[in-house]
Amino acid sequence: MRIGIVCPYSWDVPGGVQFHIRDLAEYFIRLGHEVSVLAPADDDTPLPPYVVSAGRAVPVPYNGSVARLNFGFLSAARVRRWLHDGAFDVVHIHEPTSPSLGLLTCWAAQGPIVATFHTSNPRSRAMIAAYSILQAALEKISARIAVSEYARRTLVEHLGGDAVVIPNGVDVDFFAGAEPKPEWQGETIGFIGRIDEPRKGLPVLMKALPKIMAARPTARLLVAGRGDEEAAVEHLPAELRSRVEFLGMISDEDKARLLRSVDVYVAPNTGGESFGIILVEAMSAGAPVLASDLDAFVQVLDQGRAGEIFANEDADALADAAVRLLADPERRAALREHGSAHVRRFDWSTVGADILSVYETVTDGTTAVAADERSTGLRARFGLARD
Amino acid sequence: MTATLIWILVALLAIGVYLSWTAGRLDRLHVRMDAARAALDAQLLRRASVAQELATSGVLDPAASIVLYEAAHAARQAEEEQREVAESELSQALRAVFAEPAQVEALREAPGGEDAAHELAEAVRRVPMARRFHNDAVGAARRLREHRKVRWFRLAGHAPFPLAFEMDDEPPAALVERVA
């Protein structure tokens, strides 16, 4: 099968959607499919052979922050050429509502289009204003995928229509087979995520830390992720700071080893999560998980059976749950066991097969993807378009 | 005077282009809906065939075989009006036969059973998918067709009003262990 995948965000910037697309593309290539990924990228970034650059993304203020987007005449022309050269059986667009390559592809293509909705952001003002234009483009999508039941609900409420739920994939065996690192073991709590992004919840964990460390005198906290380390421990009593270790940005291998080593993995995120891939990775590595009760997290944790849950932003509740978990090796072993069985459904072998089923369902009985000549240009309207 | 006339012409032309664009949009939706319906038909037929094959293979006990054969046969032969009911009954029969994980295990252990179980799991997984895509297309087409501009200018022509396909497509839990 010839598969075209559209990535809306810069390939050079690491992010959840980019990693998802990379793993998905490599999974399909291993199965023998032909895959081409269209992604924004700087001209001098080295790209894997299956990625086609759509040019540099332009930083623009959008939806409250600065987003790096691709739009305009040149990008549209590149999308068109990619569609034409690729002759794909199916095009898979990620995040079609962001005003970037996804939307441009929707606009320019016809034929079987599959779209995955990653975020579950409520509709922005811009989207309401552009609703009819957006609707005309989104109508072309033959199959919609939401990454969680929560994301599906938001999608149904804001855009109408329906979607199937297929979770994000994780290479479970990669995490399950990692070698624990002795210096990261021995009553350790793990945290992975941007230090200076409050929504990742490190401040909540820092607030809970004095209580945890008072109850468990040998407990240590390991933090992996970039950001200002000084500012992060600012409110922590000086004598506890030595028990917090910052590892900075770590490689995928080290991430897996860290998750294999820790006694508890804490995800204190306060919002903005539509899936929670890190929880799946932690469970794959056999780390007992303690997470805030965001909708998406509760679902990934099997309604609390595969991990412990505490009330969002409640540092006391977090501290109590962490102390209880650290003091109870049997509960941790039970969580490890349940978690490892539960994550099988998030393995690429399952998730990839499901996505392929979607492709096959929409390509049954239709033609391949082509550049849509009808919707663009007045020439087409008066029957003057080239074939 | 001439200026007014030109403006009226321009406005009429703009309305015409807009209506033609809307008609194109509607046409595309109808094409998508037809494709989704064809895909749904294919998946339903596939599921019924796999079920019938299993029922006649002798892997299942005679009672289960009869129940499954009956339901699969009815689903394949159903008239258009009875289709939704017949397909729902096949879903129920499949759930009843494969209610126990032990039954699925027994099927897997039989010669050739691994493949049959895999095929059936694929089929019962794809039916809800195809149905959701079909109903999504139907919903989009209906929303546009109910709009004033489409009704007043009869842009939909003689195309029948799109109907969703409603059925019970819950797969047997023992067969598909996936997230909803």
Image: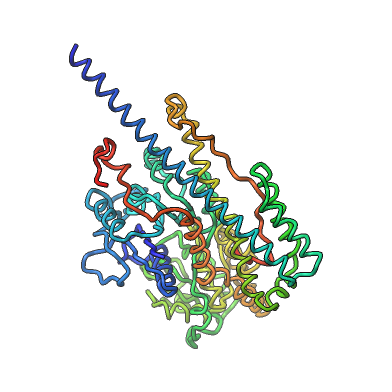
How many tags in the picture?
0
Relative vertical location of residue A307 with respect to residue A219 in this rendering, above or below:
above
Relative vertical location of residue A204 with respect to residue A326 in this rendering, above or below:
above
Farthest residue in the left direction?
Answer: B2
Nearest to the observer: residue B41 or residue A371? B41
Residue A142 image point, x, y percent: 46, 50
Nearest to the observer: residue B166 or residue B46? B46
Q: Is residue A252 left or right of residue A67?
A: right
Q: Is residue B89 left or right of residue A64?
A: right
Residue A223 image point, x, y percent: 45, 74
Q: Quadrant of residue A313?
A: bottom right
Residue B24 image point, x, y percent: 38, 38
Nearest to the observer: residue A97 or residue A366? A366
Q: Is residue A315 at least partly visible in the picture? A: yes
Task: Give the residue at x 41% y 73%.
Answer: A32
Q: Is residue A270 at least partly visible in the picture? A: no
Nearest to the observer: residue A197 or residue B100? B100
Relative vertical location of residue A299 with respect to residue A108 in this rendering, above or below:
below
